[in-house]
Image (tube, helix red, strand yellow):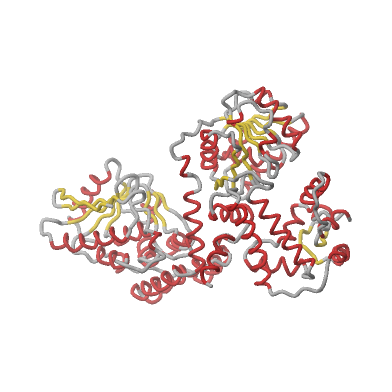
Amino acid sequence: MTVTWELRDRIAVIIIANPPVNALGKAVRERLATLVHDLDADTSIDAVVLAGAGKLFVGGADITEFDGPVEAPLPELIAAIEGSAKPWVAAIHGVALGGGLELALGCRFRVAAPGATLGLPEVNLGLIPGAGGTQRLPRLIGTETAVAVAVEKLTLDTFRAMKVGLVDRVIDGPLVDGAVSFAKEALARPLPPPASARNAAAVDWDAADARIRKAAKGLSAPPAALAALRHGIEHGFAAGIALERETFLRLRASEESAALRHLFFAERAAPRPADLRQVSPKPIAKVGVVGGGTMGSGIAAALRGAGLAVTLSERDEDALARGMATLSGIFDAAVKRGLVSVAETTERFAGVDGKVGLESLRDCDLVIEAVFEDLAVKQDVFAELGRICRPDAILATNTSYIDPREIARSLQNPGRFLGLHFFSPAQVMKLLEIIPTPDTTPETLATAFDLARRLGKVPVRSGICDGFIGNRILRRYRGEAEILVRQGLSVAAIDSAMRAFGFAMGPFEVQDLSGLDISFMQREAARARGEEVAIQPGDLLVRAGRKGQKTGGGWYDYVAGDRTPRPSDTAAKIIAPLVQGQGDLAADKIAERLVGAMAAEGEAILAEGIAASPADIDLVEVHGYGFPRSKGGPMFLTARKASST
């Protein structure tokens, strides 16, 4: 860490150099506090320009300090800068986020280079701005926009920041030189009041609170940030600062924030595994997708969203027409949701070349197979791809259960092959399990991680086992839920408990949605191989024709055109031979039991080397299976509980 300064024609220029993001760690804060005092006392200085080294201004506070005691508090530093006898000018480039933006808010002026991003994303970490962000921002840019930034995670680019009054000048050309010139001009005019001395108007607080609570889905930080902002406007800056700081420190010590910070660090590390950082990925411009079903079409849509050219291959004209229609529907749905414009959708769809057969894939850089989950079918596809595709083309299977080594058994140059397990809908879900075989080269693996980055996915490397990381844990989770059913608990009580825990749906609701026959067929296949697989309650339902929503009944009953699950006496009678007793378990104990089963399977996965770390398992569960983000994942949650007992 270095914080240096130099004098330029009576303007002190301070540069923060604390790579990689110029975080405001304790040493940086202490050095800046010393400079505020020293530069104020220096009669050769008229103003101060504050800038960041490298590619950005300041990326925020040092989050690694949040589990320790508070030292050299940032609010005191910012208050000192704001109260300085010499006006400070923040020269912003790259990003000014969180504490970085709060630092800039304490300066009398802000100038920015084109392309900068300014925001207060603390709510993503279960926090609120803790150094004046909820108080100074509305007094500078108006309350409505400040609520959007500090509470609803809106980021501002340079020109929008200029428009709302957050930035005083856009600097084209060398930023520090422009900031120094701006400071000289500003000294020739009466100085504007600091942010803390300005006023801010009220908004419809009740409407804002209702909107924010609905979007927060139970998270604590967003409504708390709004409350702090409102308190300062209604009771004055000092009262607002006091509530903001008290709230920040309280949330910083919460389990929710600890969980969200855990995921933040895991997500930040996921795209760049340590063993691949020196390995260059292959360039990928054109991708082939084999199979135009729900998964293949979703993968094609995700690839087009990243600007990659796509060839979608199907076995015949009818299947191709269905695949292209599915893809068109995906794009149309994105337009209806306001995610893309009609022009963008037209361009994306035009970038998909639909073809019958595999011959059209010979010039692709990467081919992803997404056909039916059948080993023989997949083996035939890769035997043909091995003959058709360039020797340097990467080949990937989207299998969710089958051993990739078996799929590529006859493939020449197996170093270019691996598994890429997308999650449905592939154009939406963030998780991408990357499954190398023992033959997969580091270059191929690095290319897969780079593809995940381009697609905006969260990549997790998995070893080879039945179901890999996610589906293996899912099987254990569902199995434990069925054990509870066997013990006499109702499926409705179990589902209700898991919704209360934070899942969007309970395990039996999810099975009805996806279809009970999927796992049933896997168990039947294992039985056909001679494996001893006990009869499950779900097996009885499928054999009775109850496969879930698609048949009008599974664990629950459904009315045509209505997906609302209704408790089913019919299902209860079908599974009754396997139910013993009348179980009674509190909702929190049900959740504890099921999450404990997930964590236990996670421990086995770690012991076998299938996953590299507990954090990887948590990423899989949060981004692929709906584990509540505020709980951090089954491994994190279980470890925290164990450490507190």
The residue at 71%/74% (across/down) is 585
The residue at 36%/76% (across/down) is 239
The residue at 38%/77% (across/down) is 235
Q: Position of residue 262 (x, y in %)?
A: 49, 59
Q: Position of residue 515 (x, y in %)?
A: 77, 52
Q: Quadrant of residue 231?
A: bottom left
Q: Depth check: 481 or 61 in front?
A: 481
**Left or right: 304 as drawn, with respect to 105:** right
Q: Position of residue 332 (x, y in %)?
A: 65, 43
Q: Check the image and report above or below for 342 versus 238.
A: above
The answer, for residue 132, to whether it is visible in the render is: yes
**Left or right: 247 as drawn, with respect to 494:** left
Q: Position of residue 283 (x, y in %)?
A: 50, 30
Q: Spot the residue most to the left.
A: 43
**Left or right: 575 as drawn, with respect to 244:** right
Q: Depth check: 628 or 337 in front?
A: 628
Q: Depth check: 455 or 404 in front?
A: 404
The answer, for residue 328, to whether it is visible in the render is: no
Q: Quadrant of residue 434?
A: top right
Q: Check the image and report above or below for 244 versus 614.
A: below
Q: Quadrant of residue 342?
A: top right
- Count of number-bearing discs: 0
**Left or right: 223 as drawn, with respect to 504:** left
Q: Depth check: 619 or 555 in front?
A: 619
The residue at 67%/67% (across/down) is 593
